[in-house]
């Protein structure tokens, strides 16, 4: 009998979620996702604390933090690149790299590397400027 009640409760819950998804706006969906993720994280932290595994979990999280940060930065760089490449002209790309008309592929690569060493986000530079350099290089090399 308890399993039947559990199954009935799950069916009613899933039907309610289905109805919500049919009529929800994007803002309501975002709010629900944030609420569910926050609740799940709070529950996980509570269970880890109760079972005595919280210090191990925090150590693992701190060890994985640089990987997550690198993936986030890479994703943001990928997002910034297409927007810059769409609106860039050949003159703008040459100006960004500090080149003149008739620059060879080797000149483009050399200027890109020299400037990227200065403005790369890992060197406390600007992610936007790094994206501009990437877009200019890709535009000139027609990637």
Image: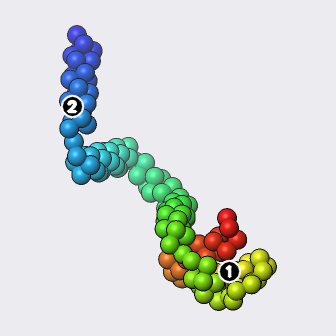
> Residue at position x 52%, y 65% from top?
82
Question: Residue 70 occupies which quadrant of the picture?
Answer: bottom right
Describe the element under mark 2 as helix, strand or loop: helix
- Give percent across and percent down for residue 65: 50, 62
Position of 78 relative to 50 (above/below): below
Res 19 label: 2
Left or right position of 96 against 38: right
* Quadrant showing the C terminus: bottom right
Q: Residues within 10 Å of mark 2 (few under 14, many from 20)?
A: few
Comparing 3 with 10, the one in front is 10
> What residue did someone put label 1 on?
112
In space, the residues marked 2 and 1 are separated at their CA atoms by: 53 Å
- Give percent across and percent down for residue 26: 26, 49
> Residue at position x 22%, y 17% from top?
8
Left or right position of 101 against 19: right
Q: Is residue 132 visible?
A: yes
Comparing 10 with 94, the one in front is 94
- Give percent across and percent down for residue 28: 22, 48
Comparing 76 with 52, the one in front is 76
Position of 71 relative to 43 (above/below): below
Describe the element under mark 1 as helix, strand or loop: helix
Q: Is residue 35 visible?
A: no
> Residue at position x 26%, y 24% from top?
10
> Residue at position x 50%, y 72% from top?
87
Res 52 label: none
Left or right position of 87 against 28: right
- Give percent across and percent down for residue 27: 24, 52
Sequence-first disc among 2 and 1: 2
Position of 47 relative to 64 (above/below): above
């Amino acid at each position: 009998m308890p399993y039947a009640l559990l199954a009935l409760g799950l069916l009613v819950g899933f039907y309610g979620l289905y109805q919500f998804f049919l009529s929800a706006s994007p803002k309501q969906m975002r709010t629900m996702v944030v609420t569910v993720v926050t609740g799940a994280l709070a529950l996980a932290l509570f269970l880890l604390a109760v079972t005595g595994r919280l210090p191990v979990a925090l150590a693992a999280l701190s060890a994985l933090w640089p990987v997550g940060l690198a993936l986030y930065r890479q994703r943001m760089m990928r997002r910034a690149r297409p927007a810059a490449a769409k609106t860039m002209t050949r003159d703008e790309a040459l100006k960004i790299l500090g080149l003149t008309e008739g620059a060879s592929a080797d000149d483009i690569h050399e200027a890109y590397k020299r400037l990227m060493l200065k403005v790369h986000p890992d060197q406390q530079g600007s992610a936007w400027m790094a994206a501009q350099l990437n877009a200019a290089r890709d535009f000139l090399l027609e990637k």
